[in-house]
Every structure is written in structure tokens, then in C-alpha cells.
Amino acid sequence: MNLPQPWTNARYFRSALKRPWGRALLYPFFSLHPRPVFLLGNQKSGTTAIAKLLALAAGKTEETYLRGFSQHILEDLYHNRLPLKEAIRQRAKFEFSRELIKECNLTFFYDQLRDLYPDAPKVFIVRDPRDNIRSILDRVQIPGNLTHLDPARLGALDQWRGILDNSWLNILSAHYIDSLAGRWVRATNIYQENQSELILVPYEKFKADKAETIYRLCSALALPIKKDVSPFVDIPFQPPGNASVPWELFFGEDNLLRIERLCASQMHFLGYPLFYP
């Protein structure tokens, strides 16, 4: 890859990738990878940390965010107004040139992704819905015990708005906790329906032994282990939430019950016990 000046400067390069005109200038210098490893799952499930450490261990290039996939593009993809192949060509050619691609939103277009990359290895990362939803709300600084979410507060969010408001996925919920629980259920349903094609990594197992989980994932993907990741496992690749707050205090009884009621079937399937049995 021989990029012209000033694109070899990392700051200019990343800045150009954020703009359609910059992408148009850069894309002739990249080729789509024919068989990348995809890491899927819901947002704030540990996907970024696992992708970063996996790439480090295996000596692979990685991408953890599709900058060109705006909420508008995601909605066009979901409603079949835009083919995934065309969206990649127009908006994500650089990211899809990498050897490992982590993008949680691709989870919801799994059928299209599988059709486009039938032989590419795919990993699904899952996290207990109570921890997952708490982490999302921590990230956007929204309490978990509200009786309702002020629309003005939702409207002030950037790309996270499409994660809290999942109406674009036809998850119609009047309550923000129901919307987030519905998103978790949708993602885990995709795993359950396609589990023979996906390598499952529970976040809880990763958290218990991060380095060993990464090495086992390398083995499952037939990737070489080129680097010891032990010194890097506690790097915060994403802004951390406050996992020390118990669920019942963070959500309150009513909202915690909402999560467990909506997620119960998939929690049972994945081995997550109910707090309120």
C-alpha cells in the first residue's frame, strides 16, 4: 500500500476517512480482504477489547468501528434499501481491507454478511443482559432506574441514539429499558439461529481469564499466537462503566424485572440465572 502525501500522516488519514470525499480519494489504494474474521455481538459486550487483544496475539490488522456506516446507512441496510456489498464499497472499503473486523451493527444484518462472506470465520460475543444494558447506560450517562426517558435526552445522543431507540430494527418499545432488552434479545436470537456458524465467546469467561480466552479463540480460528497479550489485558479499550453497582441498585426492582421478563428465554438458553426467579 503506497499512499500519497499527506495521507501517510496518521492524523490526516483518520480525518480523511471520516469524510466521503476523503474516502473517495483513499479507496483506490485498498482492496477488500477476501476472508476477514468478523466479531459480532451487542454493543458494550467486550467486543472491542476482545478484537484488539485477538489482533495483537495473532499479529493481524483490525478495525473496530465502521466510520462510514451512519445511522441513515444502517437503516437503509436493515430495510433492504441498500445492499451490504454496495455499502461496503461506498462507505467501508478501508475497514473491510483489514484482517479482523469488529462491528456490532453487522450482527443485525447477519444474513447479508453470511451471503457476502460465506467462508469467513465469525465470532459472537455475548454478555449478561443486565451487565450489558448497565454498561450501555453508563456509557451515555443515563440512569437505569428511570420510569421514562426524556425524549430531549435521547435526541441529544450521537450514534448511541440508534442503540437506545431501536424502532429502526422494528423493536417498538415505549420504555427505554424494554428497547435495550429487545435489542439484546434480537442479537442473541441471531446467535441461536446460526450457532453452527458462529464461535461463542461469553464475556464472563473472557473476564475470568482474558489471556487464556484469547489464546483459545486463536486456536478455534486457526490463527497463530505471535505475541503474549498478558501485559495488555487490563488496558481500557473503551470508557469503563461502574460494574461495582449492584443490578438492583442501578436499575431498581421494576426495571430489573423488565429486563429479566423480556430476556428470560435467551438468558436460560445462554445459562444466565435470573435475579428474581
Image: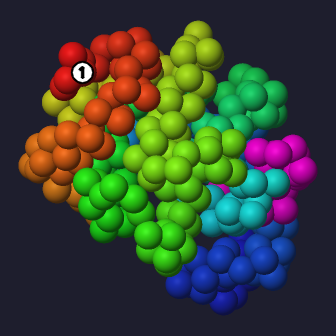
In this view, 253 is above or below 4: above
Residue under circle 1?
274
Looking at the image, residue 16 sits to the left or right of residue 146; the answer is: right
65, 251: nearer the viewer: 251
Q: Position of residue 211 (x, y in %)?
A: 23, 34
Q: Position of residue 40 (x, y in %)?
A: 53, 37
Q: Which residue occupies 46% across, 50% down?
A: 175
In this view, 238 is above or below 201: below
203, 173: nearer the viewer: 173
Looking at the image, residue 7 sits to the left or right of residue 82; the answer is: left
Looking at the image, residue 49 sits to the left or right of residue 19; the answer is: left
Tell me, yes or no, if residue 99 can be seen here: no
Q: Is residue 82 magenta?
A: yes
107, 9: nearer the viewer: 107
Looking at the rendered structure, the secondary structure element under dot 1 is: loop
Q: Which residues are magenta?
A: 77-95
